[in-house]
Image: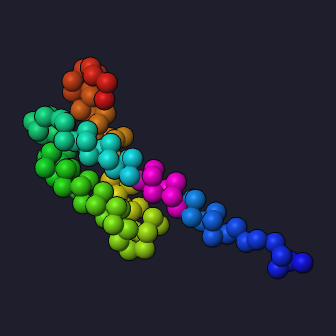
Amino acid sequence: MANAAPIFAYEVRYVIELILLVFALVIEGVALVHAITQRSDAFAAIGTLPKGGWIAILAVCLVLTLLGVGGGVLSIFTLIGIAAGLIYLLDVRVGLRDLHDGKGFW
């Protein structure tokens, strides 16, 4: 009787990994686009890495996440990419916004 029931473990894992992948790509993509659209002197004004450094970090993380290097969504590279994107969005973007007096939709 137990063998007659379908096993949904692989489907559930696939859906969870797909949701995590989309989340990672959105976070990293938004952070990368925001970093590209900012002025380069603003990064020095808030005392963080230069614009080129953030763009390089976020672009490499995005590419590694897209390629699935290291075993897919739960790889160390994807987790580092999510962390880098969140650090940029929650720390650097806020500093850049405060530097510009909070104006703009970003």
Q: Residue at x 38, y 74 (%)?
A: 70
- Does the segment drawn in magenta span residue 21? yes
* Relative depth, front residue between 3 and 9: 3
Quarter of the figure that contains the C terminus: top left
Quarter of the figure that contains the N terminus: bottom right
* Relative depth, front residue between 35 and 11: 11
Does 48 appear above or below 39?
below
**Residue stretch rendered in magenta on the structure:** 17-24
Does 99 appear above or below 7?
above
Q: Residue at x 27, y 22 (%)?
A: 104
Location of residue 91 in the rendering, given as x and y in whole percent from the top left corner: 32, 41
Q: Magenta span: helix, strand or loop, mainly?
A: helix
Q: Residue at x 19, y 50 (%)?
A: 55
Q: Residue at x 30, y 57 (%)?
A: 62
* Relative depth, front residue between 1 and 103: 1
In this picture, residue 19 sits left or right of residue 12: left
In this picture, residue 65 sits left or right of residue 72: left
Residue 88 visible in the current orientation:
no
Name the colouring of the figure: rainbow
Q: Quadrant of residue 5?
A: bottom right
